[in-house]
Amino acid sequence: MNNASLQQRKEAAFARGQGTMTPAYIDKARNAELWDVEGKRYIDLGAGIAVVNTGHNHPRVQAAVQAQLERFSHTCVMVTPYASAVELAEKLNEAAPGNTPKKAIFVTTGAEAVENCIKIARAHTGRSGVIAFNGGFHGRTNLTMGLTGKVAPYKAGFGPFPGEIFHAPYPNAYHGVSEADSLAALNMLFTCDIEPSRVAAIIIEPVQGEGGFYAAPASFMQALRALCDQHGILLIADEIQTGFARTGKMFACEHSGIEPDLITMAKGIAGGFPIAAVVGKAEIMDSPQPGGLGGTYGGSPLGCVAGLAVLEVIKEEKLCQRATEIGARIVARLNQLQRNHPHKIGNIRNQGAMIAMELVHEGDASQPDADLTRALVTQAAKNGLILLSCGIRGNVIRFLPALTITDALIDEAMTLLETSLDSLI
């Protein structure tokens, strides 16, 4: 069995829409390292798209799941619940920013979390409209595709999408979109498209994920909070990629000091086990009638015990602090790489261990180099380094290492990155 034969079998068995970024078929993984079926080792700077923040097979997470498997794997939390679900909900409510009492629900995926946020917001406000941002990514279901602000590959050919969804520019200084521009566009929506009294929610990623790892300034998040308060609109923080210590805080919205009304959680919540959640202000969360929220697999017992273990690891291993240290170490190496290739590396940015390098032609932000980005991901994999790309222009390399990665592995990974880029320029 080898990578090439498995890829041939996958292409014959899988629909082509579920593609493959790197055809390396993994046999085992530990912390920030992977080994494929041919025995080749990789340093993983993707963490399963910010899922294994605590590293692959963290011993604490592994032990919790193994113990749960000895007892039961599923009963449905809405039928015959279990203590671990109650405990995880309590701990997530406590961890959510702000002093307002919180409640939670469990679902299975990030897209489900977003959909349920919209349901809760509409039930609470009696309004229908939702505002999202250009470049945002909120999922692949019909409603969440409508919210997503990036056409290819997520929306192309899949419409029509639900109505009453509107988009505004996301503040992005590197590409010339100021906070004032974004706020003016919101006010223009209120003037031309939908009155604020009909808007149920504004949803925003504090740091855009698929859109390119652009962080909303704290002052913009605060202005959004004030705007929502002014008009009775709920503010949803989509923390699916940014949550669980990734940005140096438990949740990225903490950097701006705001309290969202609702927060979506998934990815890093359970160290690789499928579970997602919505946490929000208790009064808002209680708006839907009993039975209006739920899902057969939501709050899986395996996901719940894994989530409890992840929270322990984040606290005991000080992973919020570690995320800041990782970000600084990687950015220092990327800055040196930029000095070596100023015409190709246009911008480097990070919030904690959510780090991006934007590739351009001639140092010009308006000339994205998507071809080099794709080539770098491919070349890095050949050299034993797993990278992810993103961005609405397809020209951003994103770095999402496990927060348990060692300094030695970071340094080795950055050397592999330099070697890979140098070979392409």
Image (cartoon, rainbow, N blue to C red):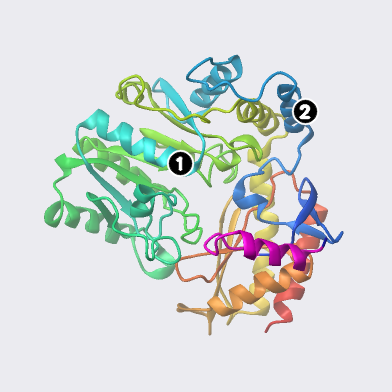
User: Dot 1: few (<14), some (14–19), or many (≥20) neighbours within 10 Å?
Assistant: many
240 left or right, relative to 284: right
In the image, what residue occupies the spot 69% across and 82% down?
Answer: 424
Residue 165: x, y in percent?
26, 51
Q: Is residue 26 magenta?
A: no
- The residue wearing badge 1 is 253
Q: Is residue 1 left or right of residue 137?
A: right
In which quarter of the view is residue 403 placed? Answer: top right
Residue 82 x, y percent position in the rendering: 58, 15
> Could you say where residue 214 lies in the image, as x and y percent from the top left?
47, 58
| SS for callout 1 | helix
Q: Quadrant of the C terminus?
A: bottom right
Residue denoted by label 2: 63
What range of the chain is rendered magenta? 2-21
Tell me what residue is drawn at x 55 percent, y 61 percent. Answer: 15
Which residue extends farthest front? 12
Instruction: Name the element at disc 2.
Output: helix
Dot 2: within a 10 Å radius of its alpha carbon, few (fewer than 14), some, or many (20 or more) residues? some
- Magenta segment includes 12: yes
In the rendered view, would you say 98 is above or below 386?
above
Q: Amino acid at mark 1?
A: Cys
**Above-or-below relation of 302 to 344:** above
**127 relative position to 120: left or right:** left
Answer with the quarter of the image where residue 267 lies.
top right
